[in-house]
Image (spheres, rainbow, N blue to C red):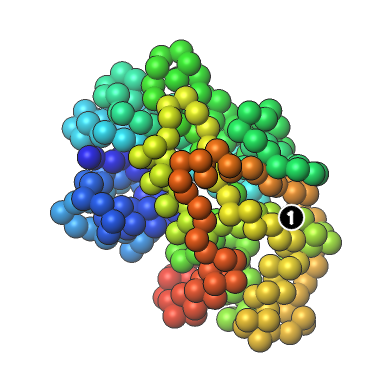
């Protein structure tokens, strides 16, 4: 089995590369542009992993990789992902998330058709959910430039299944956390600001709700989908752990013995969705269950950032 992974040097998919190398005998081919959020230090260079450095928006580059490698399975994870950055400037989000996805889909259609093409989307595509849980059949109602470009890529992938028969499987995952996540993200920022004696900013009243999943649970979910997922279907991925942002901060403060003087309320983000929550019973029917509690995973995450200061000091 040969798997092509895009976005392999960033947080989530570097973890996926490492997991697959450790737990399967599959060969891994990957693509990364090495933007500010990706690093060669995140992924091992070994006989079973071949990394191509380049831009997925360059169709001729992507086409050549499909011609040379002929992957059995594609995990398309490359994306611009930080909501704040999309609010400041959406150009790179439209380019990478939409045009880049189109390039990879076109290569799968016209150069080499994989057995499965997993198109990574996000729970943010459903928009703010005041009550209940979003299901895979719910209407997509994105509200930020980031989530809108991801929804476009999501629907584009589905159209390639319906129109051309490309074996697309769509995943929509909740917020990830764990080792090697860029410090611009919520949980690493809290940890690193405490370690460096800086105040921790909190948008609005701090009561926005997110579901949190440890990255190890995410890539085990992806393996279940790779092995058992059905083309044409979408699968939500989540832990069922919902927390207000203020409660996440307080948990980390308590573990790290930080007092409330570190907390700084700031003006709310523009268009800030109040709550995301997804129903992942469809994924659980494939035999997957989350293994990590928030408390055990956050302890490990804090320990990793404390022990690997080199990682975030270079950013």
Find the residue positioned furthest to the left.
47
Q: Residue at x 58, y 43 (%)?
A: 280
Q: Residues within 10 Å of mark 1 (few under 14, many from 20)?
A: many
Q: SS of the residue at dot 1?
A: strand
Q: Is residue 165 visible?
A: yes
Relative horizontal placement of residue 88, taking residue 226 as reference (left or right)? right
Q: Position of residue 290 (x, y in %)?
A: 52, 56
On the picture, is 263 further left or further right than 302? Answer: right
Figure check: 147 above or below 82 = above
x, y percentage for residue 229? Answer: 42, 35
Q: Quadrant of residue 139?
A: top right
Give the residue displayed 36% in from the left and 61% down from the top.
Answer: 42
**Mark 1, residue position:** 209
Look at the image and tell me in which quarter the N terminus lies.
Answer: top left
What residue is drawn where x is 68% and y is 81%?
Answer: 254
Left or right, 92 with reference to 134: left
Is residue 86 or residue 235 the one in the foreground? 235
Q: Position of residue 263 (x, y in %)?
A: 75, 75
Quadrant location of residue 148? Answer: top right
Residue 58 seen by the camera: no
């Amino acid at each position: 089995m040969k798997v092509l992974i895009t976005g392999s040097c960033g947080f989530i998919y570097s973890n996926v590369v490492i997991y697959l190398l450790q737990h399967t005998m599959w060969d891994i081919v990957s693509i990364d542009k090495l933007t500010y959020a990706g690093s060669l230090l995140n992924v091992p260079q070994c006989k079973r992993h071949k990394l191509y450095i380049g831009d997925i928006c360059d169709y001729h580059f992507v086409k050549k990789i499909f011609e040379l490698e002929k992957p059995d399975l594609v995990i398309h994870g490359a994306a611009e992902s930080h909501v704040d950055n999309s609010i400041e400037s959406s150009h790179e989000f439209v380019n990478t998330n939409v045009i880049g996805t189109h390039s990879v889909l076109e290569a799968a259609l016209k150069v080499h058709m994989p057995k499965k093409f997993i198109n990574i989307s996000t729970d943010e595509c459903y928009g703010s959910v005041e009550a209940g849980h979003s299901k895979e059949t719910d209407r997509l109602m994105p509200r930020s430039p980031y989530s809108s470009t991801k929804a476009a890529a999501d629907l584009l992938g589905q159209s390639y299944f319906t129109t051309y028969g490309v074996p697309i499987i769509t995943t929509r995952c909740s917020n990830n956390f764990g080792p090697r996540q860029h410090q611009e993200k919520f949980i690493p920022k809290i940890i690193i600001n405490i370690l460096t004696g800086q105040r921790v900013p909190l948008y609005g009243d701090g009561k926005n709700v997110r579901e949190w999943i440890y990255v190890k649970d995410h890539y085990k979910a992806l393996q279940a989908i790779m092995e058992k997922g059905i083309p044409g279907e979408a699968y939500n991925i989540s832990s069922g752990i919902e927390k207000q942002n203020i409660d996440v901060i307080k948990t980390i403060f308590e573990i790290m013995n930080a007092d409330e003087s570190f907390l700084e309320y700031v003006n709310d983000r523009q268009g800030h969705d109040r709550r995301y929550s997804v129903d992942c019973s469809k994924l659980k029917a494939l035999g997957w269950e989350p293994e990590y509690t928030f408390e055990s995973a956050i302890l490990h995450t804090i320990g990793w950032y404390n022990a690997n200061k080199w990682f975030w000091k270079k950013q």
